[in-house]
Image (cartoon, helix red, strand yellow):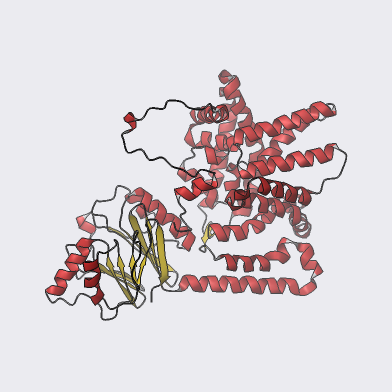
Amino acid sequence: AHPLLGSGAERLARQGVWSRLTVAASPDAVRVLARPATPAADLRRRMAAALLKQDGPERGGVQAALVLGSAVVPLPAAVRESFRVAGLSHALAASGFHLTVLLGAVMAVGRRLPRLPRCLLAAGAMLLFLLLAGPQPSVVRAVLMGAVAFAVLESGQRSRPLGVLLASVLLMLLAQPGWLLDIGFQLSVAACAGLMLTARDLEQALAHRLPVWAAAGVAVPLAASLWTLPLQLLHFGTVPLWAVPANLAVAPLLTPLTLGSMAAAVVAVTVPPLLPLFAWPLGQLTALLLWLAQAFAALPMAQWQVGRSQPLLVALFTLGLLPWLVPALGRRLRGWARPLGLGAMALTMGVHMAALAGDQLLVVHQWGGDLLIARHQGRAALLSSRADGMSCASAARLAVGLGVQRFDWIQLLDPVATEDRDCWRGLSALVLDAGDGSTSLQPGQRLESRGLRLAPLTASSAAHVLTVGRHPWLLLPDRQSVWAWQQQLAEGHPALPPHLAGLWLGFAPQHAERQALEVVGTARRWVSGAWASPPAGWRASGSSGFLAGAAG
């Protein structure tokens, strides 16, 4: 699968699931003979259902996410998107912050207790957090660090936070090496390292320009943002530019909301009649949090889509960022560390932006359909063989990862008109649907923006010529397109430009079809789908894969 999309099999493999059962019969023909007991999962579902019923899918969903983590709560897509664009996703993900809030409240109550009851109380709070949020890597990291730090403090020793972090990460990876690839785990560790290594120096530097309270408030989210920036570029290709002010704005709300939501969740499964007592105060705080997230997400350039960078470029960018990530290193290397760092980051961004500005063609074949993205000087256009919502969602994820703010135009080749027009309209202001006769292209017409042009070859098929910059490609999505194009050739119509840059087929051709296509004078021939052994000059995407390269 394409790295920007992944696949269900890859996601399941990271969870330790290696087999999948596909049932061809109707659901009524399948009967569950036995189901293993899942008390912890049942408890989470009861808590989430109670909060959702009490305050609705948006407010109740946010409250449930503050307790259980957004990974196990059915949050509305619009809410997830608002928090993501505003740089507030961490607030809804079970993490060290939520454990810190819970432990702080518990220790405030048990501070004067003898050591044994106090330790039991802290251990109970950490186990409760692990039970509610589940053994996600970021949760296990937070609990393990909390347990080690608490044990060190109770023994009268002075803890070393960085040592605790490194020891916790090492133990986790020894037990489960696959967690290293978990994005949530990577972000959690990076943010934690930023708070330990960078926040204090940032606070001291900002204290000369800001009030003490403001310097402390800005330093924490700024340090976390700096440390997670390389991972943002590597995995998402986006930078939430308003993340620091957004985190400052919501900070006073998160602690009371988290504690209140945890209390409400416990009450929901122990004393349900008392749950309405939490409804009004929690509802008002949640409404304000939602409003702030939506307001920051709606600001101009709330999310800078720069496109996903290559790992080597991200590594170079990280090296350039080191003098700011570890201020002690910058001081030790005197005056030349930061100029060199700025140069490395500028070089990285220059190479990355130059790659985005080239003439590129990407074909993604997934779930039996195809997405073709043509890029010219940083802009892009899209062709999709399917018009369903899943294809639209995949196109949206590709756009974000490729740094495409909006497609210049979209051509849907599906003969069935789309039922998800709003989704496609969200990607481009100009969407042509072949299933809707009123908006389909006819021979002699063309769909064109600067450097990107699409022209149909026949009225009876989906055959097109796509020109990217100065490089024309022949697109034949199905066998009907091949037959219609051959019919035009037989009738003497000059249907093709004189110099084709490439040919794309939406199917694996048979021997006779391949011979007929040899008249297309191009060295590059791409095929979507599985093809066991394509001959020289042909490339196949596989049953779930992609083809990418320069258009020329």
In the picture, measured across the screen, residue 199 lies left or right of residue 140, that is right
Question: Residue 70, how many percent across, how many down?
Answer: 55, 41
In the picture, measured across the screen, residue 534 lies left or right of residue 402, that is left
Residue displayed at 53% across by 52% down: 85
Q: Split into 4 quadrants, where in the image is the C terminus?
A: bottom left
Placement of 483 over or under 271, stated as above or below: below
When asked about the image quadrant of residue 472, the answer is bottom left
Q: Is residue 281 visible?
A: yes
Extreme front residue here? Answer: 533
Q: Split into 4 quadrants, where in the image is the N terminus?
A: bottom left
Residue displayed at 74% across by 40% down: 146
Q: Is residue 221 visible?
A: no
Placement of 184 over or under 53, stated as above or below: below
In the picture, measured across the screen, residue 183 lies left or right of residue 207, that is left
Q: Nearer the viewer, residue 19 or 409?
A: 19
Q: Nearer the viewer, residue 155 or 347?
A: 155
Extreme right residue here? Answer: 156
Residue displayed at 31% across by 35% down: 25
How many callouts does the rendering have? 0
Extreme left residue here? Answer: 491
Placement of 389 over or under 374, stated as above or below: above
Question: Residue 233, how many percent across, how many down?
Answer: 57, 61
Residue displayed at 13% across by 77% down: 492
Question: Residue 367, how many percent across, how many down?
Answer: 36, 51
Question: Residue 282, how many percent across, how many down?
Answer: 59, 32
Q: Nearer the viewer, residue 205 or 191?
A: 191
